[in-house]
Image (cartoon, rainbow, N blue to C red):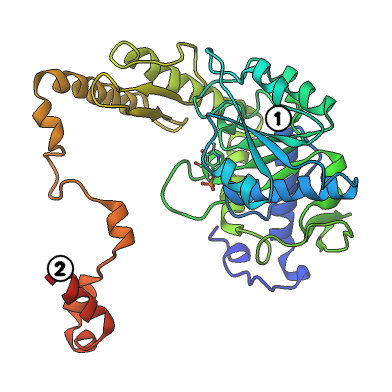
């Protein structure tokens, strides 16, 4: 990222002076298409959720092109879905149809059959699901949707469970988004920028956002001339720093990319095996890269989602297990200890939601009293202190 050719680029740099950056983007597109098992990629969306919205806009453009946009109004989502899925469906102007989960944690196929018809535009599914379970009926599910003329959307936020092992395109999905910040560079959190590229099957390629990054012999360029495109979904070329990190991360594994997923899955099952007797396990199956436990025997409904990723050392996993088991012991022997934990920090529990909603920029005023004495902010602060 610190190479001058990457670091000093301007978003409006002419193509001739940005050949290296364009080549990196083109190569990343090619790799992601291969990982997805699909035909074409756009790197533009800035996060998983924006990838979802973009994918649904592609779905709409596809059905509009076929004259079916008015009839196909519904998108099916399982009741285990991540909250961004129904939000994206609604923002894209579709209606959400929920499908139930069966006792093994798969989509309930019988329920599904009653919900898919000529008004269905598609399914939105993350596989493995948010419960960390791979849907055992995915091919059957894809058949149900394709027979009804509908499309399959893959929420790739959990792709690091299957990357290099199985491909969404082979499972029957037509549109995929990647969470580059989860799978390929900055696993989980950190608050940094994200990347939510999308990959599509060939019949959806004409609708992808512009510009596409294309190769002409030894040169790379942006291509805008795509008459059926949904247009731009983000300023400039997308989150370029994330592309560099993701590309470097993928290349560091090279042909052994599947090891990333294998270790993520191994780590999760290692934790599952050690915690499942102490906590309640709603679905007793081998998990993928994450699993859900319930702590409802300790506290009123309390779901725990545990996702160690491929990057944690065994010592860290063991420390985590020890801490989780200690919590169970304390809950029955010294519950008061848990109620006012943590005990070893200068600050106890921080109410982050309140801090975000009612930010008080106290230090600014205290450090610069002359600047702020008569400001609106200072008056607000005084009012809050008095309240
Ligand atoms: C299953 C699933 N889908 C979508 C998203 C949304 O991704 P992003 O946070 O990049 O918008 C997440 C994020 O945690 C997720 O876990």
Residue at disc 1, secondary structure: helix
Where does the image place residue 199, in percent across and percent down from the top left? 73, 42
Nearest the viewer among 97 and 345 is: 97
Which numbered disc flags the more N-terminal residue, 1 or 2? 1
Query: Which tag is nearer the camera, tag 1 or tag 2?
Result: 2
Q: Say which residue appears at 33% left-offset and 59% top-offset.
A: 356
- Viewer-nearest residue: 33 or 20: 33
Image point (68%, 24%), residue name: 166
Residue placed under numbered mark 2 in the picture: 387
Q: How many marks?
A: 2
Quadrant, the N terminus: bottom right
- Helix, strand or loop status at disc 2: loop
| Above or below for 249 versus 304 | below
Q: Is residue 58 left or right of residue 2?
A: right
Q: Is residue 214 shown above or below 235?
A: above
For disc 1, the marked residue is: 168
**Quarter that holds the C terminus:** bottom left
């Amino acid at each position: 990222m610190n190479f001058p050719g990457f670091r000093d680029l301007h978003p409006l740099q002419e193509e001739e002076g940005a050949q290296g950056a364009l080549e990196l983007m083109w190569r990343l597109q090619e790799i992601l298409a291969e990982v997805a098992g699909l035909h074409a990629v756009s790197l533009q969306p800035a996060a998983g959720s924006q990838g979802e919205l973009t994918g649904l806009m592609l779905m709409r453009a596809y059905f509009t092109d076929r004259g079916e946009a008015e009839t196909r109004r519904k998108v099916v989502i399982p009741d285990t879905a991540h909250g961004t899925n129904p939000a994206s469906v609604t923002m894209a102007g579709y209606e959400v149809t929920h499908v139930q989960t069966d006792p093994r944690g798969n989509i309930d196929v019988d329920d599904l059959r009653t919900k898919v018809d000529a008004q269905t535009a598609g399914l939105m599914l993350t596989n493995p699901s948010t419960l960390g379970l791979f849907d055992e009926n995915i091919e059957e599910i894809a058949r149900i949707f394709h027979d009804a003329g509908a499309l399959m959307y893959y929420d790739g936020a959990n792709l690091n469970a299957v990357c290099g092992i199985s491909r969404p395109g082979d499972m029957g999905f037509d549109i995929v988004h990647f969470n580059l910040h989860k799978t390929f560079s900055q696993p989980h959190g950190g608050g940094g920028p994200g990347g939510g590229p999308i990959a599509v099957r060939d019949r959806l390629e004409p609708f992808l956002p512009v510009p596409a990054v294309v190769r002409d012999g030894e040169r790379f360029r942006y291509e805008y001339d795509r008459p059926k495109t949904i247009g731009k979904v983000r300023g400039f070329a997308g989150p370029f720093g994330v592309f560099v990190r993701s590309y470097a991360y993928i290349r560091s594994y090279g042909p052994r990319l599947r090891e990333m997923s294998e270790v993520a899955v191994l780590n999760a099952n290692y934790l599952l095996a050690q915690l499942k007797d102490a906590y309640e396990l709603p679905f007793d199956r081998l998990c993928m890269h994450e699993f859900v436990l319930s702590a409802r025997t300790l506290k009123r409904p309390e779901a725990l989602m545990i996702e160690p990723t491929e990057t944690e050392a065994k010592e860290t996993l063991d420390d985590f297990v020890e801490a989780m088991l200690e919590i169970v012991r304390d809950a029955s022997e010294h519950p008061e200890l848990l109620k006012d934990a943590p005990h070893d920090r200068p600050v106890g529990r921080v109410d982050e939601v309140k801090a975000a909603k009612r930010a008080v920029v106290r230090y600014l005023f205290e450090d610069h009293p002359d600047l702020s004495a008569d400001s609106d902010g200072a008056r607000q602060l005084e009012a809050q202190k008095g309240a």
